[in-house]
Amino acid sequence: MTGYFQRNNRVRKFLEERASSFPERDEVISAMNKAGAYINSMNLPDGSMWWNKANFFSLVSELSRLPETMKQSPQDAKQKLLSFADRVPSDYALAAREAVGQKAERELRGKVVRTLLLSRLASTK
């Protein structure tokens, strides 16, 4: 709803502000369900790096925030994610392994996932 933030700082704030009323509830649930169904339809292998907590968080965040990332077939998205996993840049690997709850690392992972999902497949260029 508000982008990436440091650890759980805003979670407490949102819980307090929306304890009795959460007008965006249905929209958020729908977006999360669509992202989950899309990820499920990718049928990522069990050992994939995308099942890692930090990477999964970034994947779900980007898919649920930007529906246009799901306009491609799940198999095309899967191919992009698995190709990336074969050659993970060192800055991304570090952001997925250390300080994973920090805003800068979350933003880096989000930007990479977003760019990756919105890119064209190499075979279609």
Image (tube, grey):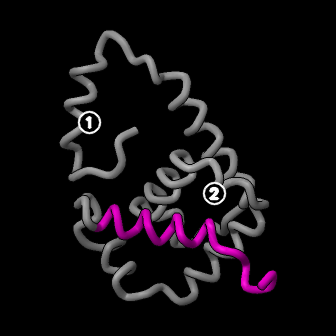
Residue with the mark numbered 1? 11
Q: Which residue is mark 2?
A: 69
The amino acid type of the residue labelled 2 equals Thr
Residue in the image at 26% along x and 25% along y: 15
Q: What residue span does the magenta drawing correspond to?
A: 105-125
For marks 1 and 2, give the one nearer the viewer: 2
| Figure quadrant of residue 30 | top right
Position in image of residue 122 (x %, y %): 73, 85
Residue 109 shown in magenta: yes
**Left or right side of 39 for 110:** left
| Residue 78 part of the magenta-drawn span | no
Q: Residues within 10 Å of mark 1 (few under 14, many from 20)?
A: few
Q: Secondary structure at mark 1?
A: helix
Decide if residue 38 is on the left or right side of residue 51.
right
> How dense is the environment of label 2, judged by Cα within 10 Å: few (below 14), some, or many (20 and up)?
many
Q: Which secondary structure class fits the magenta region best? A: helix
Q: Quadrant of the N terminus?
A: top left
State the image coordinates of residue 36 (x, y, percent, origin top left). 61, 45
- Tell me residue 4's x, y (percent): 32, 52
